[in-house]
Image (cartoon, rainbow, N blue to C red):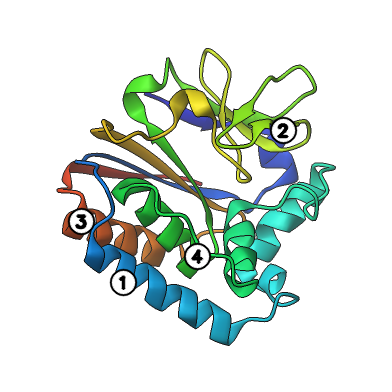
Amino acid sequence: MKIEISSKIREICPQLVLAIITCKVKNSETRINLWYEMETETQRIKSTYSLEEINKRTEIAATRKAYKALGKDPNRYRPSAEALCRRIVRGIPIYKVSILVDIINLVSIRSGFSIGGFDLEKIQGNIELGIGTNEDEFEAIGRGLLNVEGLPLYRDQVGGIGTPTSDNERTKISETTTNLLMIINGYNGKTGLQAAVNHTIELLDNYADLNEYQIRWIE
């Protein structure tokens, strides 16, 4: 499977770097130790940031800057990392979903990167990161139809599968997912991405029976 960045995104977001992880895993309900890590991190976020400071985190600010450059209001369509951190600071609990989804959320909260997580077997053909249009019909996970016009949009040969705001119902991770695709979006270049990748691999190894993984970079 090929993953490419469109020329339009390249032009508008020249610093963008993607860290891509594909691997075989085992998904299930969240384990106690993983959720302890999540609760520890949520306490750190609460004690470190005010609500007004969340969008100034380097990685979140870079994603918001990309949204603005593409003509999208990041206060109305927040990057997922920002939305998760704001939820924490406001005292709203993070949902337990499954080991894989909770790992992605934990890495996103800690790093500030918005991360796409997909069931690789549900993706059809190659993937291109382009710009959403008003013709893209996108059913966001848990929130219905999302207006993706002006958002960075990953598409396979069927249609949109993910944005930094939300992934799509069609290709989402389920408890039967065994082939995982993760895309970590670095709109501020490669800074911090390697640490996020290393952290992801460690968590997948500890909690999701990681096997046969591959890491690719698109710069």
Identified by mark 4, the residue type is Ile
Q: What residue do we see at 42% from left, 15% from top?
A: 124
Q: CA distance from mark 4 to mark 3?
A: 18 Å
Q: CA distance from mark 1 to mark 2?
A: 42 Å
First reached walking from the N terminus: tag 4 or tag 3: 4
Rate crowding at label 1 as few (under 14), some (14 to 19) or many (20 or more) other CA atoms within 10 Å.
Answer: few
The image quadrant where one finds the N terminus is: top left
Observer-nearest of 155 and 138: 138
- Asked if residue 166 can be seen in this view, the reply is yes
Q: Tell me whether circle 4 and circle 2 mark residues in contact (CB < 8 Å).
A: no
Q: CA distance from mark 1 to mark 3?
A: 12 Å
Q: Locate residue 9 relative to residue 172 in the image: left or right.
A: right
Rate crowding at label 3 as few (under 14), some (14 to 19) or many (20 or more) other CA atoms within 10 Å.
Answer: some
Dot label at residue 109: 4
Instruction: Please state the horizontal and vertical placement of residue 111, each as a whole percent of the image.
Output: 48, 67
| 182, above or below 159, in the image | below
